[in-house]
Image (cartoon, helix red, strand yellow):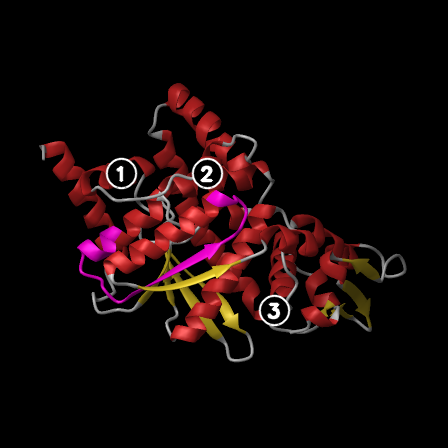
Amino acid sequence: MDIFEQTALSLFLNKLSRGLARFFPETKFLVGISGGRDSMCLLYGLLTLGYQRLILCHLNHQLRGAAARMDERFVISQAQELGLSLRLARAQTEQFASDQGFCTEMAGRELRYAFFAEVAKETHCATLLLAHHADDQLETCWINLLRGTGTAGLAGMRMESARRIEKERGNTLHIIRPLLRLSRSEVVQFSCERKVPFREDATNLDTNLMRNRIRHELLPFLDRRFGINYRKAILRCTEILADEEDWMKGIAESFSYETQLAYKKLCSLPRGLQRRILRQWLLKQGVPEVDFAAVERIRSLIVLPLSKLAKVNLPFGVHARRRSGVLFLERPPHLDC
């Protein structure tokens, strides 16, 4: 082993260890495992650091035919070889996407988190480790920028975040991304030195997908034109925006738990705060996938004269109404909180 390889191995483990600094090796974790390089490196890194109470979670999205079945078998064999517990499920992702009006990527994400939530409840383990790294963060930032996102999208993924899994009980799934300050190249170096087994996903080379176009075309072009250090600058921006997003979210938070919003009070607030309050309010009221257009439609109930508009349509059959000085929602039964 030469000096470079030793440094690659220790660098990965040191950064992973810092990402888990507040957890003892005896902590029980759920670990999202696709069978790909990133999640397998996370798994082998955890084992190297002495974390043993791991419950592997693999969802077969059934999007890639025989390749997906081979991924599933690979994860099963790895769990058996390492003596780890495994929770496995299969999902009809394309059907779900069609039923919900989601793109395939969004449908897959929703199904994964629903699966993780079920495993969390079954195993009484509410801390989930995911293998997103700094290059994933950079790609996500560009995707959201090209879609015209606000600060929430540009802030990207957090090292630690939470997702509600039982509304009636207030139970939360805690999500940790301990590789988020590691680059893809650092993960690759670790996989080579540690000889981590993994499965290649051929769809990662498909440049018809936006993320892959960004990964294989946009980012290499920017690297050539501006040097690789620009990546650190953008990632620093995501951290700054994440802090500001938390601050602004806190201001709007007190409004979001109300089932009705007072029209006059909203009218008196700055436009940016109106948008933030309405977005958080819609999400808290169980409206999925709230985008800018949906927020602007409901904001039209505030900015237009009272005689002009009293109802707007939102996604998934939800309606927002203004009546007797308040805004409120009418929802289909399956979206009732």
Name the foreground residue: 23 vs 200. 200
Q: Position of residue 284 (x, y in %)?
A: 60, 67
* SS label for mark 1: helix
Name the foreground residue: 74 vs 183. 74
Label 1 is placed on what type of residue? Glu
- State the extent of the magenta-drawn residues as a range: 44-66
At 46% from the left edge and 31% from the top edge, which residue is drawn?
Answer: 205
Q: Position of residue 323 (x, y in %)?
A: 82, 70
* SS label for mark 3: helix
Label 2 is placed on what type of residue? Glu
Q: Which mark is residue 255?
A: 3
Alpha carbon distance from label 3 to label 1: 43 Å
CB atoms of marks 3 and 1 within 8 Å: no
The quarter of the picture where residue 185 lies is top left
Which of the marked residues, 3 or 1, is nearer the chain's N terminus? 1
The N terminus - image quarter: top left
Relative to 66, say whether 299 is above or below.
below
Name the foreground residue: 143 vs 126. 126
- The residue beneath circle 1 is 186
- The residue beneath circle 2 is 139
The quarter of the picture where residue 307 lies is bottom right
Which of the marked residues, 2 or 1, is nearer the chain's N terminus? 2
Q: Position of residue 216 (x, y in %)?
A: 45, 28
